[in-house]
Image (cartoon, grey):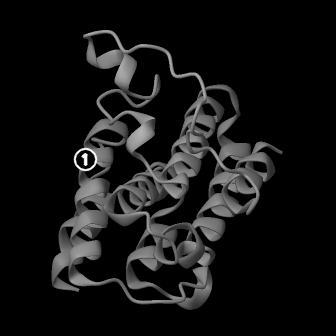
């Protein structure tokens, strides 16, 4: 299904989305819309992003489209698959590159968008970093704060009515 395509975008070592020297770049208009992803307005222009961050943005855009056209039962299965990929390949996606905070931010937003469809148990497991998802490394306090902040911002947009999940998120800094 579509999660295979998204996973391939994330894991393809030969996929380079970074702007190339001498490639055509359309002129930017004075509006902010031209500087951001169509599905994620307000984000910086792609020329200032790492390839890791660009892959995550493309994957997030594909996931946003998928969420609007796929049935809920298929979405939950796809979300679990994507979440497993995001957590098992965390180091490859953000940790082993010079991607900096931008790739971490994109990764954490994608995790939040994916977990908004998963069960409460899966969300709790994600934050407890249980081996179910194969997380390979611990987060630094700065990364944990960034991931938590991304979750809060995403949650208020996607799932504002979910009190149980909100309680789990509120407890993260104290866990």
Task: Give coordinates of residue 36: x percent, y percent.
Answer: 38, 27
Q: Is residue 14 left or right of residue 158?
A: right
The residue beneath circle 1 is 153
Q: Residue furthest right?
A: 1
- Image quadrant occupied by the N terminus: top right
Q: Residue furthest front?
A: 22
Work out whether residue 17 or residue 39 is closer to the camera in this orientation and state it. Answer: 17
Task: Give coordinates of residue 15: x percent, y percent.
Answer: 72, 51
Q: Is residue 16 left or right of residue 43?
A: right
Looking at the image, residue 70 lies above or below residue 136? above
Residue found at x 59% / y 74%:
92
Q: Is residue 129 left or right of residue 17?
A: left
Work out whether residue 49 or residue 115 is closer to the camera in this orientation and state it. Answer: 49
Which picture quadrant has residue 58?
top right
Task: Give the structural element (helix, strand or loop) at label 1.
Answer: helix
Task: Give coordinates of residue 40: x percent, y percent.
Answer: 40, 31
Work out whether residue 136 or residue 23 is closer to the camera in this orientation and state it. Answer: 23
Task: Give coordinates of residue 173: x percent, y percent.
Answer: 17, 77
Residue found at x 42% / y 55%:
112
Which picture quadrant has residue 170?
bottom left
Q: How many marks?
A: 1
Looking at the image, residue 16 lies above or below residue 158? below
Work out whether residue 27 or residue 74 is closer to the camera in this orientation and state it. Answer: 27
Residue found at x 46% / y 59%:
107
- Image quadrant occupied by the C terminus: bottom left
Residue found at x 62% / y 77%:
88
Q: Residues within 10 Å of mark 1 (few under 14, many from 20)?
A: few
Q: Is residue 37 left or right of residue 174?
A: right
Which picture quadrant has residue 8?
bottom right
Looking at the image, residue 24 lies above or below residue 47? above
């Amino acid at each position: 299904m579509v999660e295979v395509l998204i996973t391939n975008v994330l894991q393809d070592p030969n996929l380079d989305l970074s702007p190339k020297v001498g490639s055509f770049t359309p002129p930017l208009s004075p509006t902010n819309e031209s500087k951001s992803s169509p599905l994620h307005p307000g984000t910086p222009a792609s020329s200032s992003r790492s390839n890791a961050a660009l892959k995550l943005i493309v994957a997030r855009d594909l996931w946003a489209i998928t969420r609007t056209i796929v049935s809920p039962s298929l979405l939950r299965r796809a979300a679990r698959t994507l979440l497993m990929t995001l957590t098992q390949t965390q180091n490859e996606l953000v940790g082993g590159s010079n991607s900096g905070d931008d790739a971490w931010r994109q990764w954490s937003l994608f995790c939040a968008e994916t977990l908004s469809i998963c069960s409460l148990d899966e969300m709790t497991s994600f934050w407890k970093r249980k081996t179910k998802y194969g997380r390979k490394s611990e987060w630094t306090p700065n990364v944990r704060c960034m991931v938590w902040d991304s979750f809060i911002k995403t949650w208020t947009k996607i799932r504002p009515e979910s009190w149980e999940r909100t309680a789990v998120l509120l407890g993260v800094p104290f866990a």
